[in-house]
Image (spheres, rainbow, N blue to C red):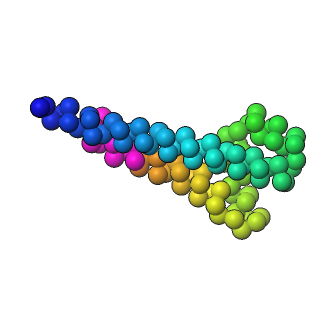
Amino acid sequence: MDISRVRRTAGNPLKGVAYLVGIASGLIGFIICLVIVNDVIGFWGVVLGLMFFPIILAAAPWYALVAWGNPIPLILVYGGGIIAAVIYGIGASIAGD
């Protein structure tokens, strides 16, 4: 059996797990960020948040930390992305990408 095939077989599932972790933490974090925006600005803030979702994902977790002292949205959004990137990097290095 070829070693590159074994490496791909071991590394590609890790990359798939990284995609799932990134998508799950991103969607859950986005929903939490929309709830934060809804509490602060209201319905029209949510409408604008849906149009400008990168700004919401970047700003709302920091607002929750500074204004409310709640680090959970920040950990979920940024930590989920970092964990997904680390898992993907491990999978890519195993697979030889």
Return the residue nearer the eye: 1 or 69: 1
Hey, which quadrant is residue 71 in on the image? Answer: bottom right
The quarter of the rendered structure image containing the N terminus is top left
Q: Residue at x 59, y 58 (%)?
A: 75
User: Can residue 32 be seen at all in this image of the molecule?
Assistant: yes
Above or below, comparing residue 56 to residue 64 in the picture: above
Q: Residue at x 34, y 46 (%)?
A: 90
Hey, which quadrant is residue 5 in on the image? Answer: top left
Residue 92 x, y percent position in the rendering = 33, 39
User: Can residue 59 be seen at all in this image of the molecule?
Assistant: no
Q: Residue at x 87, y 43 (%)?
A: 43
Q: Residue at x 13, y 31 (%)?
A: 2
Residue 46 x, y percent position in the rendering = 81, 42
Residue 73 x, y percent position in the rendering = 65, 56
Q: Main secondary structure of the magenta part?
A: helix
Q: Is residue 95 magenta?
A: yes
Hey, which quadrant is residue 66 in on the image? Answer: bottom right
Above or below, comparing residue 70 to residue 77 in the picture: below
Q: Is residue 51 left or right of residue 18?
A: right
Looking at the image, which residue sits at the far bottom?
69
Q: Is residue 1 left or right of residue 48?
A: left
Q: Is residue 72 left or right of residue 67?
A: left
Q: Could you tell me how many numbered marks the image carries?
A: 0
The quarter of the rendered structure image containing the C terminus is top left
Residue 83 x, y percent position in the rendering = 46, 52
Looking at the image, which residue sits at the far left?
1
**What are the residue bounds of the magenta stretch?**
87-97
Q: Is residue 66 magenta?
A: no
